[in-house]
Image: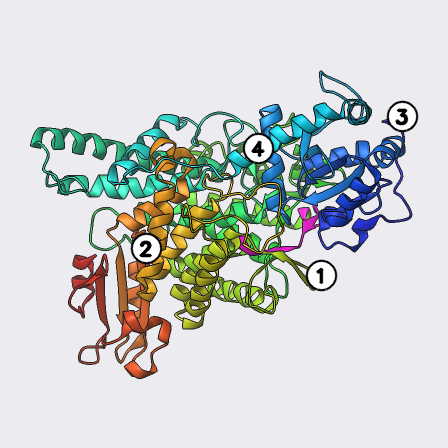
Amino acid sequence: MPADAPQRHNPDPNRLINETSPYLLQHAHNPVDWYPWGDEAFARAEAEDKPVFLSVGYSACHWCHVMEHESFENDEIAALMNEHFINVKVDREERPDVDQIYMTAVQLMTQRGGWPMSVFLTPQREPFYGGTYWPPTSQRGMPGFRDILRKMHEIWTGRRDEVTTSAKSLVEAVGRMAAPRFARMSLDEDVLRRAMRELLQSADRTHGGFGGAPKFLHTMDVRVLLRCWRRFGAAASASDGHTAAGAVRPAEAVARETQSAGREAGESLDVVTLTLDKMARGGLFDHLGGGFHRYSTDARWLVPHFEKMLYDNALLVPAYLELGQALRSDGSEEPRPFEPWPFRVVRETLAYVLREMQLPEGGFCATQDADSEGEEGKFFVWSEGEIDDLLPDEEAGVFKYCYDVTPDGNWEGTNILNRPKSQAEAARVLEIDPDELASTLARCRQTLWEAREERTKPGRDDKVLVAWNGWMISALAQASQVLGDDRYAAAAVRAADFILENMRNEETYLLHSYKDGRARFNAYLDDYAALTEGLVDLYQATFDARHLTAARLLARQMHDRFADPERGGFFYTSHDHEELIARTKDGQDDATPSGNAQAATALIRLGRLCGETDFVEQGRRTLETLSGLLAEHPRAAGQALLAWDALLGPSLEIVLVDGEDASQGDAWLAAVHGRFLPNKLVARRPANVSDDELPEVLRPLLEGRTARDGQTTVYVCRDMACGPPVTSLGELWKLL
């Protein structure tokens, strides 16, 4: 059958029909005799002396859908695959351990990677050839998948010694890269200073972000810059000429460094503000439905890859919250009482998440596809005529000007909504009162959103992944604290309860993925670490100690099941996990924080809040294993730098004890959360609760701290050394 001939679905499903992954189920009616990853496939490969073709992707991946349609639904290509290979399909979101290992192999072979990932393996799971997307026939300099299949069969049957030698060598290289050893280096404040300078050097001062196209979100990096702004801006003027190690330095050198650090700190805030503003005004952001797409294909954030990932939106929320807090600070004791624009972005992003990504049971879905009706981005783009038909003439003109809508479009003949001009600039050019413009645009967006809801929506991958949910729990909890909206905390509680009740085995160990009533697969390091930190944040939003108790159990399990007793840090898979060709230890961030850096962050924060110094020390030792990476390649270690900033301090443990009027405590907390205090931890003790009635997990922090004379009382501990109680907000500001 020619590659462009009409395709058909196999009426008899293959083995994937019994899987839970939406991605695997999409392939259940391919004519390919697919197996899920497991011993059955490799045993058959060994028995029949055939190589394995491994295909890895995920449901929101556009090119994964393309390769399926072109090749896996093609009867002729499927016949070749079934005759000469044992074919295995993997959802990278369900099995990130498998994905990591074979992606490393593909990158070693081709110097690039991506999805769909296509790898040929021996029956012993050893890779010997691989790549990413291949068209069905050779074109534009790319080899055709049909030709590759024939060539791999020829090599397997006629040049087996070469295959064996190549595979053994590749496995050794993968093993070295899977658990890299970083040099041990001393960590001090200079590590953050060097990171700040490297990030500033790579920043795009015109469009925001870092580097050129394609542009990724760099959420951890912008948060690092915000901490550098606070540390080296506000703190630079207070320098006394001593290094972090205590050595006295020449006054002239200190003055030069202080001046330079202060200037760079100011640039850091400027870069973060520009980056997050441009991202929120570009096509990367969904201006009608809220939420961010995955990344931008161009340098100015106009054309995204249209899929929406839960983790991207979860990780961006804290960045926008922190920028909003920073923008409210003008050096005065109290934050200025206005709603900064980043908070609007947070509200719109979380509105999308709660509306479209939270399941009735409480967990959050993984992704929303880029494609609908077979076309990438079709759901999200507009023609000028569609807008003219939906909006009154005058309002249509205003909307089209503000959102860059033209007859010819700004992408492939259609329009991706974006805001080239700020609200203030647009109001000035249109000669419209800014408040009136805001009202007009809000009406227009609502009208267009309602019309868009009638379109065929992109598919949704509704499996629940622990780590991604952990990040969203954290985001919602922080939003609840900063924005004072209890709905966010309530949604986070539902998600946490769902995971802890439905995604653990009989031994209370976490399971990684949940779909259609089935929780499956041993959880990975980032599952434990992200959920632990999410529960730490959730306690601070609700002051329900059960969240901390659960976090402490997870932290202990994480140490017992993942720790590397010889070299320190944590493996990505647990000690009882399936044995693969390599065991990974991830230290470098990609689109999400590395497992080791996330573990260090969670352990440091949990240890300080619970008064368990062992956790803090485990976090410190984990960072020490990454010290060479932090020092030499800080742009690959944003999350580890956030953890190091927290460990370096100053850290604040704030204990609020309610007086007779609990509403006063609420007001004080709102004031504290209005400021950018990135390394603060907050606990609350209700009035009339005796020491004996305190939850065990909080007793070290709360015991002996009582209200003075029935008034709201705050105890502030700095770097685990506590100061005297204060009973006025003015005194609290001085301590902070």
Amino acid type, label 2: Glu
| Residue 731 location, quadrant | bottom left
| Mark 4 or 3, nearer chain start | 3
| Mark 1 or 2, nearer chain start | 1
Q: Label 4: few (<14), some or many (≥20) within 10 Å?
A: few
| Residue 486 location, quadrant | bottom left
Using residue 640 as the reference point, say whether residue 381 is left or right of it. Answer: right
Residue assigned mark 4:
172
Residue assigned mark 3:
2
Residue assigned mark 2:
617
Where does the image place residue 358, in percent across and percent down from the top left? 60, 59
Identity of the residue drawn at 22% across and 33% down: 261
Q: Mark 1 falls on what kind of element?
A: loop
| Mark 1 or 4, nearer chain start | 4
Front tag of 4 and 3: 4
Where are the magenta residues, as a range?
452-467
- In this view, 707 is above or below 638: below
For residue 330: magenta?
Answer: no
Where does the image place residue 397, in percent across and percent down from the top left? 57, 35
Quadrant (top left/top right/bottom left/bottom right) for the C terminus: bottom left
Q: Are marks 2 and 4 in contact (CB under 8 Å)?
A: no
